[in-house]
Image: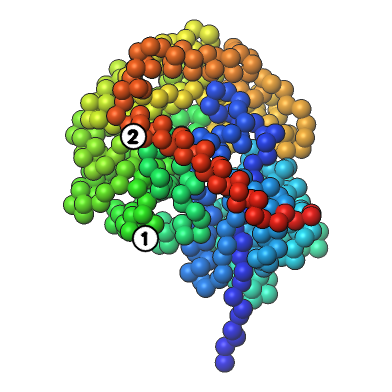
Amino acid sequence: MFTVYNVMKILLLRLPINSACKIASVGGMVSSKFYFEWLVRYPPLGLLYYGALLKQKGHTVKLLDGELMGYTINHITALAKQFNPDIIFSSVNIYNPQFEFETLKVLKDTLRCHIIARGHFPRLYPEETIVNKQIDFALTGKGFHSVIDITDAIEKKVPFENVKGIIYTDNGNIIKTANEEAFNFDTIPFPARELIDNSVCTTALSKYDTFTTMTASIGCPYSCTYCVDRYIPYQTRSIENVIAEIEECINKLSIKEIMFLDSTFTIDRNWCMHFCNEIIKRKLTFAWAIRTRADLVDDELLATFAKSGCISIHYGIESGNEQILQNLHRNMSLSQIKTAIELTIQKGMEVLGFFMIGNEGETTETVHDTMRFAQSLPLHFAQFNVVFPMPPSDTYERVKKKFGVDIWLEAYKGKNIPPDSCKPPNSTLSLKGLDYFANKAYLMFYLRPKQLWRLLTFKYAPYIAIRIFKILLIHIKQYFKRLSITPSSK
């Protein structure tokens, strides 16, 4: 004899953006709602992986994306009530956890289901997460094992202490289980992209209508002071596994453009060459883009990228001052950066440069070095970010040590944060000054006649212009879709 368990109805949830939330991003402090709804409309890749794992186990899965669809909490509550889930897995972002916990409380008060938090905030602050009574469990790791194990435990009504990678309360006691086991990326099913409308995913620089993101590796072996990926063990998927996912995207979902989200795509040169040659061999037709370092490309590699369909490379340049680069542990020269960008342009690919304003040791002079260097490069696009201490980076730890304040935790608690503690501790510039310079850097870069001409004559300029117009159409379409939803009264 064996026991047959009921199939669970599981809701995967990415919550709507809090319009009051600000993030350290393009042009300094911008509205996160604008950033994620207009500039970077990425699919919720982590939740889509969960969806694939749960569907593989036979569960009924639905995904609601408040961020991409522009849903309010009333829309989400109404749609969730229609689905009537047994479990909700919800992302909780480090930028606005208080708003998201309040939203989850509304769902908890409305629905009789388990709510499980996952994402950056629960991983970094598990105890602060689980004290919210609306949260039944929180995942303390990536969750690729935990999501199945906790679902099984709830379904079978068995004790939870053997589920690794979770935190929960029992009779008022906080119980944190052992860390979940390491995972092999090749053994995880491809993201369940059929759970979302892929046509609403795009970026301001995308070229084609059907766009998605993908990850070929996680982590990074480099030691840049501002980066959090260095704390994730570096792992690369097999070429066969990545190619199979690409073929699924092309053949099943008619995807035409893929942005690889690897922090440093070209770490393994041999892997990259074999990957590109496999794309060419199989005659796969799609546009793709990557992010990488300027000291990890060469003429042959770039030529192979272009031949296999890569149309855009985003380089982390960060600063135009070599001492600042050394401070950041970015051990490369400005001449290396310039050579890599020029070679990429020669191969016909688009180039975007990432710069940071407010690096460790930054002064007015070094900021101007960065602005001048950006203008000297043949970049199509540049992005100037104000540096913000992101946990668990070295920069964050130094800020925390100097000021004795965890800015993210204090902000979550609703306390006022000293402005100086929101930037690297040894920068002479104020946070307001950094915001000013970031905006100035944009104006000085883009409003040059030479740069305007470069953009107007760029071969992908018409594609980008049309795509930006289509983002407006996406918003109009979503507006009417929201009108068709009867909002919940709660």
Task: Name the colour scheme.
Answer: rainbow
Most extreme residue toward the top, as rendered? 365
Q: Position of residue 118 (x, y in %)?
A: 61, 52
Q: Identify the residue shown where x is 51% and y is 55%.
A: 196
Q: Which residue is mark 2?
A: 312
Q: Is residue 109 left or right of residue 338?
A: right
Q: Position of residue 469 (x, y in %)?
A: 47, 35
| Tags 1 and 2 touching, CB below 8 Å | no
Q: Identify the residue shown where x is 79% and y is 58%.
A: 109
Q: Quadrant of the C terminus?
A: bottom right
Foreground residue among 373 and 195: 195
Kind of residue sitting beneath label 1: Lys
Q: Is residue 366 left or right of residue 403?
A: left
- The answer, for residue 332, to whether it is visible in the render is no
Foreground residue among 349 and 394: 349
Q: Identify the residue shown where x is 65% and y is 65%.
A: 83
Q: From what the image shows, is residue 336 above or below residue 222?
A: above
Instruction: Name the N-terminal-most of marks 1 and 2.
Output: 1
Q: From what the image shows, is residue 316 above or below residue 241?
A: above
Q: Position of residue 114 (x, y in %)?
A: 70, 63
Which dot marks residue 252?
Answer: 1
Q: How many marks?
A: 2
Q: Position of residue 268 (x, y in %)?
A: 30, 42
Between the C-alphas of marks 1 and 2, the distance is 24 Å
- The answer, for residue 352, to whether it is visible in the render is yes
Kind of residue sitting beneath label 2: Ser
Q: Is residue 66 left or right of residue 299?
A: right
- Secondary structure of the residue carrying tag 1 is helix
Q: Identify the residue shown where x is 37% and y is 16%.
A: 451
- Secondary structure of the residue carrying tag 2 is strand
Other residues around mark 2 within 10 Å, as few (<14) / some (14–19) / many (≥20): many
